[in-house]
Amino acid sequence: MNAKRFICLIGITAALLTAPIHAQEDGPQMQAGDWEVGFGIGATQFDSDLSDDSDNELRNEIRGGYFLTDMFELEAQLQRSDAAFDSTLDTAMLNAVFNLPTGGRAVPYVLVGAGGARLDDFDWDFLPGEDVDADGGEGLAYQAAIGTRLFFRDNGTVAARLEVSSLWEDTLDDTHRHTSYTAGLIWRIR
């Protein structure tokens, strides 16, 4: 594990684990019928079967959700991760988000989702002596994540969102797992 990835992992893990401890009293109250929209930017570590590049690659996402109860949200999420092998991985997911209210400004959550993935055509030349142009593919995708929202004010309108996720996809007739670290902003609409 390279130093940059290790430092990023330690920072995000520390933020996720300590956020509820540092949360202030009288935080936002999630309610059935609330909406949430947001965006995120981060890094994806691709499966070693697809890339030998030890650096994380850029990830962008947009998301929107609807609270069915004060603790349960359905969320749509579109993601794009750039790959070191001259390709992109696009996913469209429907997530079930289970919020764990702390009574403060931090709201941790766990998330599971399913959807589709598309890997663009790519130039697979990282293996010694090989330079293979391959067709990408489309397939199913699944993800699991943990994260937290850190609301800026007691009214809970705007928050930073930190998340660590694992995505499994089968775009090339094999299942590959990618790990992502994302930070972003969300707006809650009542």
Image (cartoon, rainbow, N blue to C red):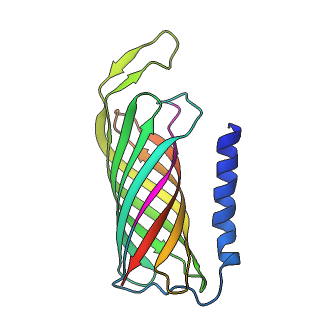
Quadrant of residue 12 within the rendered picture? bottom right
Does the magenta run of residues contain 42? yes
Rendered view: 75 above or below 88? below
* Up-down relation of residue 168 to residue 153 (above or below): above
Q: What residue is drawn where x is 38% and y is 51%?
A: 79
Above or below for 127 versus 112: above
Q: Of all residues shown, which one is farthest toward the top? A: 129
- At 42% from the left and 43% from the top, the residue drawn is 81
Highlighted magenta segment, given as a residue range? 38-48
Q: Of residues 83 and 72, which is closer to you in this image?
A: 83
Q: Nearer the viewer, residue 38 or 10?
A: 38
Residue 82 located within the stretch drawn in magenta: no
Q: In this rendering, would 107 be left or right of 32? A: right
Across and down, in percent, residue 19 comes to 65, 71
**Quadrant where the image shows the C terminus:** bottom left
Side of 141 relative to 6 (left or right): left
Rendering quarter of residue 32: bottom left
Q: Is residue 42 left or right of residue 81?
A: right
Q: In the image, what residue occupies the spot 69% across and 61% down?
A: 14
